[in-house]
Amino acid sequence: MISSIFHTILYRPLFNFFIELYNILPGHDVGLVIVVITILLRLVVYPLTSSSIKAQRSMQALQPKLEALKKEYKDDQQKMAQATMELYRNHKINPLSSCLPLLIQLPILLALYWVMRDGLSSTNLSAQLYSFVANPGNINPFSLGHFNLLSPSIWLAILAGGAQFFQARTMSRQMPPKNAGEGSKDESMAAMMNKQMLYMMPVMTVLIGFRLPAGLTLYWFWSTILMAAQQYYLTYKDKKTEAIITPLEGEVIKK
């Protein structure tokens, strides 16, 4: 039942869109098809990703207040949980919102893997195509005439890992100052964990990407780059807004 819904709602529409783009884009370059699909999918999940990024930054900004609650209710876990949820509610933060884009993108990534597996290998195209989508017969898996996107590519895997590192750096948290006191212990631990993930995730990306078809690694690379660009844009935009709305005390705003 679930596989049938997945096939009807996600896999088959994405497969037909993939083939249609291959038919209409100049040069019938499958690499260009993947780049266009990546951009369009990023635009679709842009609102969710934006809310996720803002939620992560808001959670970081609330760390001092969360530490204060831990001190106040250190002997009553139930009251601390209630006070924490109240704090999130007052600041209009959903702690689960940062996970939503990932949960949405995982089935898309899985569907895209099967689309490229079936599309690039040109297996049984006509059985999956809608009546209004022309069957190209065979799909050339080579991009730019040299890169076989059906086979794994160590170079694309390394590029995807580098993009993962760059993207993680844009959201990395700084270690609290040494004189921050006992309240900074949890913050220090979180910062250390984030620092470990900063290096572990790129390594895992390279190891996984080396075993995937290069077409999927190409999607992973461009998707991560666009995600990093979105994070940078939102961070720059928020800092610029804060500078206008909340100037430093004593600073004269010139008009």
Image (cartoon, rainbow, N blue to C red):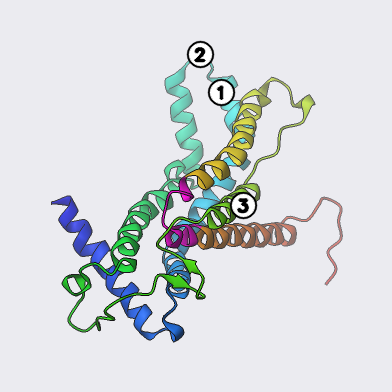
Three-letter amino acid code at the position of disc 1: Lys
- Residue 69 in view, yes or no: yes
Three-letter amino acid code at the position of disc 2: Asp
**Range of residues picked out in magenta:** 208-220
List the residue tagged with mark 2.
75
Residue 160 location, quadrant: bottom right
Please tell me whether residue 216 belongs to the stretch shown in magenta.
yes
* Numbered disc total: 3
The local crowd at label 2, few if under 14, some if 14 to 19, many if 20 or more residues have their Cα within 10 Å, is: few
Tag 3–tag 1 contact (CB < 8 Å): no
Compared with 150, 196 (above or below) is above
- The label number, if any, that marks residue 162 in the structure image: 3
The picture places residue 159, in percent across and down from the top left corner, at: 59, 56
| Between 75 and 3, the one nearer to me in the picture | 3
Sequence-wise, the earlier of marks 3 and 1 is 1
List the residue tagged with mark 1.
70
SS at circle 1: helix
Secondary structure character of the magenta stretch overall: helix
